[in-house]
Amino acid sequence: MCVETRMMMAMKTATGMKIPTLLECVVFCIVYRLPDGSEIEVGQERFQCTETLFSRNVKRSSLGLQSTADTLIISELVHEALGQATQDIRQVLFENIVCSGGNTMLKGFDDRLKREMDANAPENSGWKTRVFGLVDRKLSCWIGGSIMASLSHMDQLWITKQQYEEVGPSLIAERSNNF
């Protein structure tokens, strides 16, 4: 049982409050086995670190993070990106949000992002937000890059080491603009 659970049980016993059930203790604290074989108990930290993605109300300084007035939460970043799309495809993008990458593998990430996006949907638009969490999302970026690299028309975009050394970083921008 983790320290937080023991403290919570002691406080509730001393004050006559209901002692948490075993299920409540298990949900609150989880024991993780590390690669070296040692074990750690994690309680509220599981929620604190992920909550910073969705809420400004989290004390970021206690987590070693800086917070500024222009710090955006994940739903605002997605909404801002969708807002930069042309009007004719904005609804299609809004209704087909695909999550990929390590942080999106957090338990409940897709559902939480959907709720946040629904709350920020344009009023009276009738748009139905759909958030997709792909099974292989941890590797989606690599898979997408692999597919792009295997396309025949990508050959013209390859840059050799010699070309890069001759022209420099501006060659990347030049080739990207031609794509």
Image (spheres, rainbow, N blue to C red):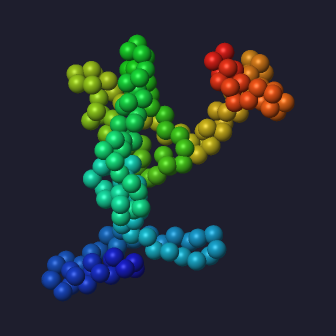
**Horizontal and vertical percent position of residue 103:** 49, 49
Determine whether 97 is above or below 153 in the image: below
Number of labels in the image equals: 0
Determine whether 98 is above or below 173 in the image: below
In this view, the residue farthest toward the left is 16
The residue drawn where x is 54% and y is 76% is: 39
The residue drawn where x is 34% and y is 41% is: 70
Tell me the quarter of the picture where residue 73 sits. Answer: top left
The residue drawn where x is 78% and y is 21% is: 155
**Horizontal and vertical percent position of residue 94:** 39, 26
* Screen quadrant of the C terminus: top right
Tell me the quarter of the picture where residue 69 sits. Answer: top left
Between 135 and 63, which is closer to the camera in this rendering? 63
In this view, the residue farthest toward the top is 88
Between 57 and 167, which is closer to the camera in this rendering? 167
The residue drawn where x is 35% and y is 37% is: 76
Tell me the quarter of the picture where residue 11 sits. Answer: bottom left
